Structure formats: C-alpha cells, structure tokens
C-alpha cells in the first residue's frame, strides 16, 4: 500500500502557544497549576500536562481561593474573568489570539447596534465563550435549517461571526442562507475561520484526490479533527477519526491501495508518527508527503510570562 501524508497537519500556532503557557507556568510557579477545561482538545496532550503538574477543572469553584489558573485556548466569557477575580485567582489567559479576535468583533458589532448571529456548535466551549461576550445579543446558528427558524425581522441589523474551527463548506452554505434572508448582513473583514483550520481542510481535500481511505488523528471532542473527517467523507472517501495507533483496525485496509493521513490542530506529531509506523507494519511500503502550503505563524506568550522568563 501507499501512504500519502497531508501537510499542513497537527499543531497550529494557538495550540503550541497554549501548551507552552501551561509548561512555562509550571516551571515558573511550580505545581499545582489549575487549567479551566482541557487546554486543547487532545487526550494525549492533557495527560502529558497532568504528569507535569497541571490540574484540569471545569468550574472555578473547584479551585482553591488564591490559586493560579490558566484559561484554555478556546476562550471563556468575560464573566469567568469576573468570577476568577472574586475568588482571588491569579489568571493567565491562554485563549488563542484568533478566538480573541472574534470576541473583539462581537463587542464591536454589539456596540454598533447589530444582533450577532454566531455560526457554530451550540455547546462547544469556544462558542460558549464567544456567546458570553454579548449573551443577550447573540444567537447561535448551527445549520442552514436554523436560518429559517430565526425569530427576527428580515430587515433587522445583523452581523455574522463564526466559530474558528468549522468546515469551510458548511459555513459557506450557512453564510449564503443568512445573506439570502438578511442581504445587508455585516461580517468580519477577514474570515473568522482560522488559518490552520482552512489549511488542514484544503490539504486533506488534496490527498483525497488519490486516497481511497483517510485516517484523521485526533480526539473525538476536537471540532477541527471531526471537520477533517467530514471533509474527506463528503468527497466520497472512507474516513476514520482515531486517537492513536491502537485504534487502527487492519480490516479497514482490505482491497485498499492508497491511504491518506492527517491530524487535527491539537494533535502532536508523535501520535502521527506512531500511526505511520503501525501502517508500515500493516503493509505500507511507499510513503509520500503532500504539502499544499508552508506555515510559519507563531503567537507570543502573555506579557506576564515573558517578563518573568526574561528576568
């Protein structure tokens, strides 16, 4: 069998930054360092950070007063910052700068009198955070069907924002439906879907031209990993989302000549490499990497961490 490796794949700049924030905080201040929600949606990454001294919680009341807490890359509502202050928690914010950009847009559009239509998955932690910026003024839209159900006047001033990890095609369909209903709808000058999501979806689309079956390495709760799987499936290619090499099933490859592999933006390369080695054991003899674009984006650490590290 032949294996085509999709590139770009794996860690994006926001994920790299978030993990580095937790690691630096533990180095600087020692354990325990509390993290609200999984820092990124990958089981392997979370377990590695637990071993180093991070404690993951879902609610602030689980954290002792006065402790240090890091907010995950997905972002939190402004109220969470207020609640942390009340509990005397020392906060380091690991929110991805591209998510922060969407939060700022929500504030701007709300201040200008626009109703916010947030395209995304209702219960995803990023959407919860973005909606929390303007909770009384934001409606989450999950599908084209939701557009017709919106209890709004068609002449109402609305603005569209999106979750950063959505499928490009699904977002396009919802956006078109919203524009059909609200022709004067405003939206961000630059797409809210992040560069890494876009690049990884375009890269997997490229390898699907040749692959008969695609593996996406990522966790089940990773939105962007799930979207990669869906992109392949919509192109008519068999696709499986796997956490690691242990999830690869030999029966999948009966009659298959060409396999593709990619990874979500929160998946470390070590897991991809282990899967590649497992595929070689199962009969892969030819490996090719297909690169559609080189990524060289990085985000700086919060000032508080940089200041301490430079002392």
Image (cartoon, grey):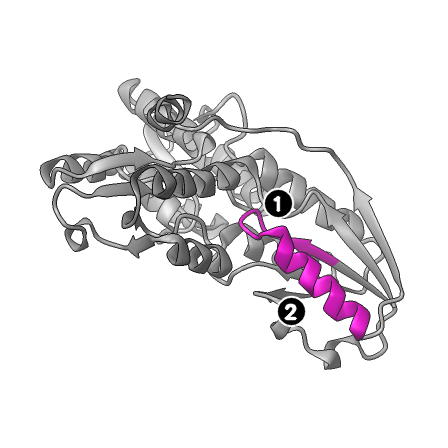
Which quadrant would the C terminus be assigned to in this image? top left
Observer-side mark, 1 or 2, equals 2
The magenta stretch spans residue 41: no
Question: Is residue 272 highlighted in magenta?
Answer: yes
Q: Is residue 228 left or right of residue 183?
A: right
Residue occupying image coordinates x 14% and y 41% = 66
The image shows residue 247, relative to residue 68, as above or below, that is: below
Side of 56 relative to 200 (left or right):
left
Towards the viewer: 190 or 140:
190
Residue found at the very far front of the displayed protein: 311
Q: Which residue is mark 2?
A: 245
Of 92 and 216, nearer the camera is 92
Vertical order, 155 against 4 (above or below): above
Name the N-terminal-most of marks 1 and 2: 1
What element does badge 1 sit on? helix
**Horizontal and vertical percent position of residue 270:** 63, 56
Query: Which residue is drawn at the image coordinates 43% and 45% (left, top)?
Result: 147
Q: Which residue is mark 1?
A: 169
Q: Position of residue 301 (x, y in %)?
A: 43, 28
Q: In the shown orientation, is residue 257 left or right of residue 60?
A: right
Is there a contact, CB below 8 Å, between mark 1 and mark 2? no
Where the N terminus falls, by quadrant? bottom right
- The magenta stretch spans which residues? 261-281
Q: Residue at x 40, y 38 (%)?
A: 24
Q: Position of residue 259 (x, y in %)?
A: 80, 63
Residue at the outermost top position: 112
């Amino acid at each position: 069998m032949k294996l085509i490796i999709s590139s770009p794949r794996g860690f994006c700049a926001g994920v790299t930054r978030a993990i580095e924030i937790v690691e630096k905080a533990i180095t600087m201040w020692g354990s325990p360092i509390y993290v609200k929600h999984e820092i990124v949606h990958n089981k392997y990454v979370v377990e590695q950070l637990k071993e180093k001294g991070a404690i993951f919680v879902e609610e602030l009341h689980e954290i002792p007063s006065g402790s240090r807490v890091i907010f995950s890359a997905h972002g939190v509502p402004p109220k969470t910052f207020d609640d942390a202050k009340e509990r005397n928690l020392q906060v380091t914010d690991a929110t991805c700068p591209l998510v922060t950009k969407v939060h700022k847009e929500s504030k701007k559009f709300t201040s200008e009198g626009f109703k916010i239509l947030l395209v995304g998955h209702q219960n995803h932690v990023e959407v919860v955070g973005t909606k929390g910026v303007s909770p009384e003024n934001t409606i989450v839209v999950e599908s084209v069907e939701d557009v017709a159900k919106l209890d709004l006047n068609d002449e109402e001033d609305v603005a569209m924002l999106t979750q950063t990890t959505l499928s490009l095609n699904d977002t396009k369909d919802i956006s078109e439906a919203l524009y059909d209903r609200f022709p004067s709808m405003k939206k961000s000058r630059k797409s809210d879907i992040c560069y890494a999501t876009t690049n990884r979806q375009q890269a997997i689309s490229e390898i699907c031209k040749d692959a008969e079956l695609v593996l996406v390495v990522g966790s089940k709760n990773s939105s962007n990993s799930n979207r990669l799987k869906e992109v392949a499936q919509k192109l008519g290619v068999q696709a499986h989302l796997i956490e690691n090499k242990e999830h690869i099933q030999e029966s999948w490859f009966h009659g298959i000549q060409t396999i593709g592999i990619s990874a979500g933006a929160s998946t470390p390369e070590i897991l991809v490499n282990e899967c590649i080695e497992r595929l070689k054991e199962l009969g892969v003899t030819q490996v090719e990497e297909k690169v559609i674009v080189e990524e060289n984006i990085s985000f700086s650490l919060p000032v508080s961490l940089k200041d301490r590290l430079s002392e």
